[in-house]
Amino acid sequence: MARIETVERLREIIVDYGPRGAAKIRDHICEQGRAFIERSPFLVLGTIGVDGMELSSKGDQPGFVEQVDSRTLLIPERAGNHLCIGLQNILRDPRVGLMIVRPATDEVLRISGRATLDDDADLCEKMSAGGKPAVLIIRVAVERAAFHCVRSARRARLWEPEAWDAPTRISFGKIYADALAQPGLRETFDRFTEESDSKLY
C-alpha cells in the first residue's frame, strides 16, 4: 500500500496553484453566495464531537436560512429525530462546516465558521414554517466561504433525471427491529415512521 503521509507527497500528486487557486476563498459570503443562499432549500451541516464528525441535513423552502449580514447566518432547527447529535457537538466544539445546495445547480457553496445555539422566542417565531416556530436557531459566524467547482456533480449526473435509478425505500422498522432483536417491531415502527414523516412540521 502506497500510503500518503506528508503534504509534500500529496502536492506531488495534486498541484498547488498557490494564491491564485485560493483567491476564491473569502472571509465572508460574496454577493453571488448571498443570492445562492436566498434560493437554496437544502444544506448539510458538519460538526465535531467526541465520537468524530457528524453530518446533519437541514431543509425547508428556498431562503429558509436567514442572512443577517455577509458574515452571519441563522439556520432554523425544525422537528427531527430528537437525537441532537450535531447540536450537542456545537455545545462542545463550535466549529462547523456547511455545504449549501441548489437543485439543478452543479456548484455548491461551502462555508466554515463557528456556531452557537439561540433560544430566542421572538426569533424562533420569526423563523416559523408550516405554522410552527423554529425549535431553536443555529447562528453561524462565517470564517471561510467559497463555491466548489462543478465537476463532482456533473460526473455523478446528479441533476439529470434520466440518469437516476429507482428511489430507495429505507425501512427504519428493520433497522430498529434488528438493533433491538425484536422482529415484530418492524411493521409497527414502519407504520409509525410513515405517519410521523408526513407531518413535516
Image: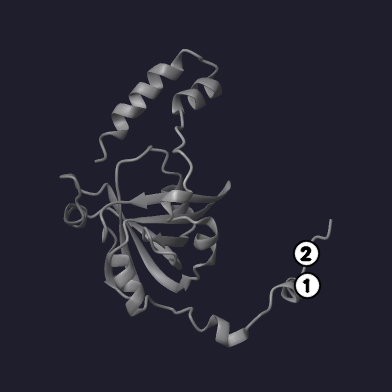
Residue drawn at (21%, 53%), measured in percent from left and top? 124
Quadrant assignment for the N terminus: bottom right
Residue drawn at (45%, 24%), measured in percent from left and top? 173
Give the image location of residue 29, x and y in percent: 37, 75
Q: Type of residue at label 2?
A: Ile
Left-right relation of 64 to 85 = left
Give the image location of residue 34, x and y in percent: 31, 72
Q: Gap between marks 2 and 1, in whole Å? A: 6 Å
Residue drawn at (26%, 40%), measured in percent from left and top? 200
Quarter of the image for residue 68 reads bottom left
Residue at the outermost right position? 1
Residue drawn at (55%, 17%), measured in percent from left and top? 181
Give the total number of marks visible in the rendering.
2
* Residue on which the image places disc 1: 9
Q: Secondary structure at mark 1?
A: helix
The numbered mark, 2 or 1, whose residue comes first in the sequence reads 2
* Circle 1 crowding by C-alpha within 10 Å: few under 14, some 14–19, many from 20: few
Give the image location of residue 120, x and y in percent: 23, 55
Quadrant assignment for the C terminus: top left
Quarter of the image for residue 32 reads bottom left
* Residue on which the image places disc 2: 4
Give the image's coloring scheme.
one colour
Dot 2 and dot 1 residues touching (CB under 8 Å): yes
